[in-house]
Structure formats: structure tokens, C-alpha cells
Image (cartoon, rainbow, N blue to C red):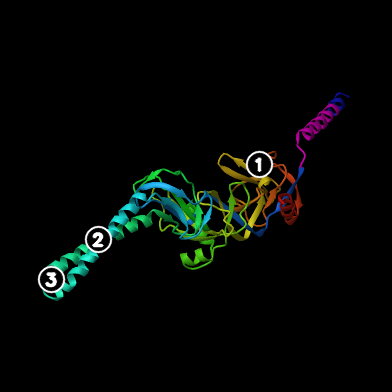
Amino acid sequence: MKKLSLSIISLVLLVACGKKEEKTTPPVMPYKVVAVTQSNTTLLAEYPATLEGITDIDIRAKVDGYIEKIYVQEGQEVKKGQLLFKLETQTANQEASAAKAKVAAAQVEVNRLIPLVERNIISDVQLETAKANLASAKSTYQSIVAKINYASIKSPVNGIVGTLPLRLGSYVSSQTAEPLTRISDVSTIFAYFSMNEKQQLDITMNAVGKTFQEKITKMPRVNLILSNGMQYENTGKIETFSGQANTQTGSFNVRASFPNANKLLRSGGSGTIQIPTNLNEVIIIPQNATLEMQDKRIVLVADKDNKVKAVPVEVRAVPGGRFFVVDKGLKENDKILIEGVGIVSEGTLIKPELVDYATIINSEEKAVN
């Protein structure tokens, strides 16, 4: 009877222990995963830029004088040769009249001496002296006339008038520090920006062409995002890279040009250049399928035993903030978790629920649009 009781008690304890173990074993939870594949996309690299016209010419006085008239206004469009300013020339006009009179007197003297020399009444020396005096008088007169002409200041190019810091009555000279204004030819706008060596290599190595110049020529057209966040209506073209990197910053200076027929863009403005890079057959994943841990980007992958494995990846952001291009860390058909990221720990056994990769990409794209 005692042996039977002990057997029953042992059986009860064994069943109880079995139930206890069942309670502590966590259930295998289902999580959605996608098997990554390769596709095509376009990356946009962005660089802050400053805007300048084809030419920005400081307008300065060549002669001394007071500003008598201002014929233009700030922001006005002007043509080459158009009158901008006129300096006071009253004194110069008086000097010109006196110089002109001296020219006339010197000419009379020459005319008087010529027949006397021809009749050998006087020597040639007197006539040559008179001719020299005439030439000197003409030179003085022409110099004063040029001074008067310089007092009428004209635009050297077609362009837009800048600020007008000086007003009527201001005294100016060729030594005045501040220019009268600046004329900017903005029919084409140059956007100047810089990039580091790695960025320069990434762009040029992905460009089509054998030589460096051929790669620049065949680079895709670039966008300009204006300071108000709007994209400029015309695309631009990268024209030049600096011949060598700046030894202080390690950066390359780059220039892109944009047509500006409507004169919307002005010198001194700012914006952001977007350079597209077309990538073919690359792995693209949703950004929300990744974790950032310290200085690493992590993706959770379901291995062949359906256990979660944390995989570090190197990525580049796709425009729109929804996707990453994976440069290193994943290979085609790897199954990555797209839910439970940040919750599921490494080594956890899961039940993968495969979701179509194209469906995820399309739904993300619709969310962006």
C-alpha cells in the first residue's frame, strides 16, 4: 500500500513539473519578413550653394567729382552702354573751353609761320616749336574732354543694378572704397558649392565616360532647391571641378550653371544643389526595418533556423526618408524583419510570415507621394 502511494505521489510531481516547464517556455511568435531583392533607384546628394551671375562688375568713378544725376534704380535691368550716373563737370567744362581756345591760338600761330618759312624769312625752328605747342594744346584739350566723358558713367554689360549706396551730391573719385553700384549679368546663374573627396569620387566613379572631362560632360542634370524650399523650374549642368582639393578642408570646389531668362535668380542668393545618382541592381530596404545602435545601423535577419540575427549594414538614404540603399551587410534573398524591430532580441525563435517585397516597396512609395 505504501509503495502504491509513493508511485502516485511521484506521478503527480512529474506531471506538475511538466506543466511548470510548459508555462516557462515562451511561444514562437509570428513576425512579418521580406526576402530582399535587387532593384533600381536614384539617390540625391545635396550641397549648400551660393549663386552668382556670369559677371558681377563693380561700377566706379574714373574721375573726381560730385554725383549730379542718378539715372537708374536698384534692381533695374540695364543694357550695355546705358547711362547710369553723371558727375558734375562745370569746372571741367570751363577748363575745356580754355584748352580749346589755346588750341585755336596755337593753330593760328602755326598757320602764320608756315608762309614765312616757305619764303625763308624765318627758320624752320620757329615753325617746329609752334607745331609742338599746337600738339601739346590738343593733347591737353583731349585729356579734359576725356575727363568730361568719364563723368558720364555707363554700364559695361547687360545686367541688373545692385544697391545704390551713394546719393546725389556725394563726392566720389577713383579711390573711393565703395563702388557706385554693381551690375550683374544674370542671364545665366552659376551655383558654387563644395564636396569632400569621398563624395567627389562617388559621383565621378558612377558617372558615364572614360576621361574625367567626359564624365563631367555626361553627368545628369542637377536640381536647385531655392531658399524658400521650392525647386527651381530649370535644371542645371555641372561644368567644372577644381583641379585639386583644398589642402585646408580637403574639399573640391564645383560650379553648376542654370539658365535664368526670367531673371528670377539674382547674384548673392543661396540654395541647395541636388545631384542625382542612378543606381542599378541594388538592395533597397525600408528605413523602419533598421535600428541605429551607437554608430552602427542594424538589420534583424531571420536565419535558416528562423532565429533572429542582428546584422550591421552600411546604407545610404534614398530621397523621401523612407528607404535605404544597402551597400554592405545584406545579400539577395536575406529575410529581414519588417515588424517587431526594436522589440525582438537577437537569438529569438520566430515564425516568419513572408510578405511580398514589391508590395512593401510600392506601399512605401505611395506613402511618400
The one nearer the camera, 171 or 236, is 171
- How far is mark 3 from mark 2, CA to CA? 20 Å
Residue drawn at (19%, 68%), measured in percent from left and top? 112
Residues packed near mark 3 inside 10 Å, few (<14), some (14 to 19) or many (20 plus): some
Q: Is residue 38 shown in magenta?
A: no
Residue ID at (30%, 53%): 95
Residue 7 sits in quarter = top right
Q: Which callout, 3 or 2, points at the residue further toward the start of the chain? A: 3
Q: Magenta region: which residues?
A: 8-28
- SS at badge 2: helix
Q: Secondary structure at mark 3?
A: helix
Q: Amino acid at mark 3?
A: Asp
How packed mark 1 is, by other alpha carbons closer than 10 Å (few <14, some 14-19, many 20 or more), is: some
According to the image, label 3 marks what residue?
124
The residue labelled by disc 1 is: 346
Mark seen at residue 137: 2
Does the rendering let one see residue 221? yes
| Mark 2 residue crowding within 10 angstroms, few (<14) / some (14–19) / many (20+) | many
Q: Amino acid at mark 1?
A: Glu
Magenta stretch encompasses residue 16: yes
